[in-house]
Amino acid sequence: MFRNKQSTEKNNKNEVKEIVSKENNFWQWFLWILQEARIVDTRYSVKGSYVWLDWGYKIFRNIYSLAQDAYEQSGHNQMQFPTLIKEEIFLKETDFIRNFENDVFWVDRAGTKALAKGERLALRPTSELIIYPMFNKWIRSWRDLPLKVFQNVSIFRCETNETRPLIRNRETIGFIEGHSAFATKEAALEFLKQVWKFYMKLFNDLGIPVKLIEVPEWERFAGSTKTIDGYVILPGSKSMELFTTAYLGTTFSEIFSIEYLDEQKTKQLAHLLCYGPSIDRIIASLIALYGDNRGLKLLPGIAPKDLIIIPIFNRKNRNAILSYAKNVQDHLSTIGFTVELDDDEITRPGNKFYRSERFGYPLRIEVGQREYKNKEMTITRRDTSQKLIFNLDSKNLKREIKKLLKQIKKTQQDIVFKDFVERQIDLTCYKTITKAFDHLLLETDRIYLINWCGSKVCAEKIESKTNFSLLGYDHESKTMQGLCIICQSKGHQSVLAKRY
Ligand SMILES: [Zn+2]
């Protein structure tokens, strides 16, 4: 435990706060960041629902816009479907309802009138039952395929487990889900590969290393015949599912008669895919992967503003410094940077520095008497605390700052991606579970790679021995064969982890 530096400032005697470091108490640290960096306010009266605050919502919008581009570039059209689902639709799909039975919030009254069975309305836990009845109306001939749509919506799940802000919510606001329909299984599976590719590119751009895992049959979403999930490891915490992708085959097409006439005028069922990450969990990942004990650390481009100017002045030079700081801001904006000027005259510069660190601005610019006199600015990197001096009139200023931001992004991403590799412990050389785990102290923020045959019985044995979850086959190493550490029959490299 250490004392928050801010509390040593004279004016903040009332704000003395003890905070726990990321290494010692991940959750206390995570909640501290949510509050101090103004991501969400967790004090809302409905359990598992949060108020998105200004800084958090600005980050949300930047991620949303990157995701939106990725969906559009891969041929999806953005649409917006309603939130409520009529119960009679739910009753059509009994497997699906069983899957979500305990998770659904129901609207069972309209004003004072109780709604009859079948007429009751569910708040969407996910959108299959909203979108696919419409696919039925839109798809007529092979010419209507493929059909690819996406939307960004709130989803509601009545989590009975302990809720965790951004990770396990009752209302998740940033579910950015894609749904698509194809004429054949081959076309659907081919596109599924493209979805993995564009998701991996998106997460790479966001600086989040992801493990693709082939989910075993008994864990799959109802109606899905092939599911690949993307997992992230949160340092100091556990693994977390970041997105899911599923080939649904013709299950929902049979239920909702999503049929088309092929070129020979024969009726065929459409093959469906669904997939989606939530921006809520993306932000949780960014906090956990990049944040430190001074606060949030945002990558350039994801930060709402890459630079913040903090003027340092006294009564005598106030006007000159503030107007110089404004010049610096205007100049940097003109040459294409996102830059904020913290010209609040009440807060002391020291407190402004701490605030800029908590909010995770990649670069902080100080301008005081010396900088003003020499037409300079002192720039400090959030990631390394390195200080650099730049001249405002330099012809290379734009190039130099761009280079610096690029460096910051690369340095930080390299650290995170290297760490991700080191957190994967390869135990595939062990032939039996005893040899693999008997002398190993398992850590929750690691994943363990073992060989597994794919059977539920063996998975359960591995899980009861380790108290971790067998997530499934390691998708990228699926071709690597080995013998199952339980039954010694043919298996593949698989992933064992503690997960949310
Ligand atoms: Zn086995």
Image (spheres, rainbow, N blue to C red):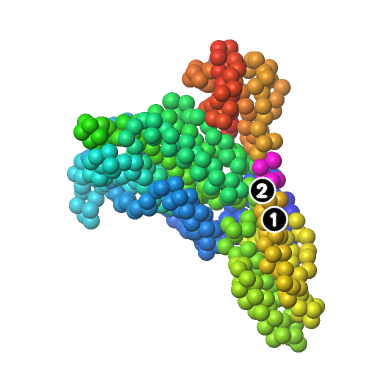
Task: State the extent of the magenta-drawn residues as a range.
Answer: 413-419
- Badge 1 density bin: few <14, some 14–19, many ≥20, Cα 10 Å: many
Q: Is mark 2 within 8 Å of ligand 1?
A: no
- The residue under the point 52% across, 61% down is 58
Q: Which residue is mark 2?
A: 413
Q: Amino acid at mark 2?
A: Gln
Q: Viewer-proximal residue, 22 or 17?
A: 22
- The rendered magenta stretch, by its main secondary structure, is classed as helix
Is ligand 1 closer than 8 angstroms to the Cβ of mark 1?
A: no
Q: Is residue 302 above or below residue 390?
A: above
Which residue is painted at 63% across and 58% down in the image?
A: 300
Verify CB contact (< 8 Å) between mark 1 and mark 2. no
Q: Nearer the viewer, residue 10 or 351?
A: 351
> Which residue in the structure is indicated by mark 1?
408
Picture coordinates of residue 57 (x, y %)? 51, 60
Is residue 351 at least partly visible in the picture?
Answer: no
Q: Residue at x 39, y 39 (%)?
A: 274
Residue 155, x across and y down, in percent: 39, 48
Type of amino acid at the residue the image marks with label 1: Ile
The answer to whether residue 150 is left or right of residue 43 is: left
Most foreground residue, 154 or 29: 154
- Tell me: 231 left or right of 389: left
Q: Is residue 43 above or below residue 105?
A: below
Instruction: Give the image location of residue 419, x and y in percent.
Output: 69, 40
User: 317 left or right of 52?
Assistant: right
Q: CA distance from mark 1 to mark 2?
A: 8 Å
Quarter assignment of residue 146: top left
Which structural element holds mark 2? Answer: helix
- Residue at image location 54% in from the left, 34% down from the top: 212
Answer with the quarter of the image where residue 372 lies. Answer: bottom right
Quadrant of residue 157 in the image?
top left
Q: Is residue 416 magenta?
A: yes
